[in-house]
């Protein structure tokens, strides 16, 4: 008996191909299912803005009454005392209407003139007619400095030497005041120079127009190490 089925219509040889296609489709659906993302839906409610009606406090307007002005002071009355013409008036000045050129006139004695107190001059001179001087002259001044200045130990150990410039004021009585260092060298030399000058005896004061005045005096003191 002959088979009636056509060989082209036989699907048995193509079974393997269909199985593979089915597996591929199934695998694709599974992968798609794993990659699929879902999001939660949130409900957002938008409320309409409402204007609040705030009641304003009404401030009561009060009228301020100004106090009445103070009463005007009573008018001042000037009292005039009327005296009789026969009242005798005494004057300190006596006029002699009968005086002639031969009338003796008393000698006028002026009142005693008060002596003016001497005002201390605060001005300090730098140049005067007679400069202040140390008692005994410059030789005595140099000898005084050599005998009284002690070289500071700090300056001696550090090898410090040089000239200290000092300024001071010679008062009208010869006293030495306001001793200051204009330029120093340190190491205790500045302080030693000030100490020795403050201990100086009174100077002969400077004079301007024959009167003692305050005079500014500058003095260099040289510190030198022996050897």
Image (cartoon, rainbow, N blue to C red):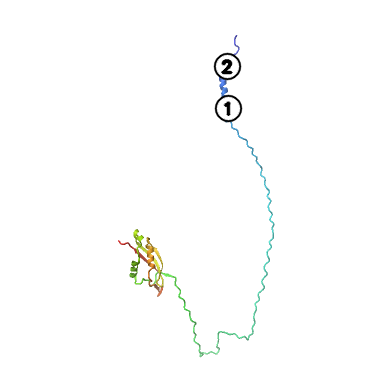
Quarter occupied by residue 1: top right
Q: Nearer the viewer, mark 1 or mark 2?
A: 1
Q: Is residue 213 above or below residue 14?
A: below
Residue, far front: 153
Task: Confirm whether residue 218 shows in the render.
Answer: no
Residue, far bottom: 102
Question: Residue drawn at (58%, 27%), measured in percent from left and top?
Answer: 30
- Observer-nearest of 225 and 43: 225
- Observer-nearest of 115 and 9: 115
Callout 1 secondary element? helix
Q: According to the image, label 1 marks what residue?
A: 30
Residue 12 - label: 2
Question: Residue drawn at (57%, 23%), measured in percent from left and top?
Answer: 23
- At label 2, counting other C-alpha atoms closer than 10 Å, the crowd grade (few under 14, some 14-19, many 20 or more) is few
Quarter occupied by residue 4: top right
Quarter occupied by residue 44: top right
- Residue 5 appears at what percent x and percent y? 60, 13
| Residue 85 placement, left or right of 169 | right
- At label 1, counting other C-alpha atoms closer than 10 Å, the crowd grade (few under 14, some 14-19, many 20 or more) is few
Quadrant location of the C terminus in the rendered image? bottom left
Q: Is residue 195 above or below residue 107?
A: above
Task: Confirm whether residue 19 shows in the render.
Answer: yes
- Residue 148 appears at what percent x and percent y? 35, 67
- Observer-nearest of 165 and 1: 165
| Residue 157 placement, left or right of 22 | left
Question: Residue drawn at (57%, 16%), measured in percent from left and top?
Answer: 12
- Residue 62 appears at what percent x and percent y? 69, 59
């Amino acid at each position: 008996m002959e088979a009636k089925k056509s060989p082209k219509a036989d699907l048995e040889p193509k079974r393997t191909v269909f199985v593979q296609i089915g597996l591929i489709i199934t695998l694709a659906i599974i992968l798609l299912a794993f990659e699929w993302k879902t999001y939660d839906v949130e409900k957002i409610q938008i409320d309409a803005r409402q204007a609040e009606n705030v009641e304003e406090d009404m401030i009561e307007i009060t009228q301020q009454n100004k106090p009445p002005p103070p009463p005007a002071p009573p008018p001042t009355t000037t009292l005039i005392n009327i005296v009789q013409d026969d009242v005798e008036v005494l004057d300190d000045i006596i006029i002699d209407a009968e005086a002639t050129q031969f009338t003796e006139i008393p000698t006028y004695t002026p009142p005693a003139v008060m002596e003016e107190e001497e005002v201390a001059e605060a001005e300090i001179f730098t140049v005067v007619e007679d400069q202040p001087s140390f008692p005994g002259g410059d030789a005595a001044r140099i000898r005084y400095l050599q005998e009284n200045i002690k070289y500071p130990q700090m300056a001696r150990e550090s090898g410090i030497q040089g000239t200290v410039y000092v300024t001071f004021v010679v008062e009208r009585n010869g006293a030495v005041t306001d001793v200051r260092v204009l330029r120093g060298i340190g190491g205790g030399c500045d302080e030693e120079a000030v100490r020795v000058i403050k201990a100086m005896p009174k100077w002969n004061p400077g004079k301007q127009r024959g009167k003692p005045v305050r005079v500014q005096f500058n003095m260099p003191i040289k510190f030198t190490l022996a050897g």
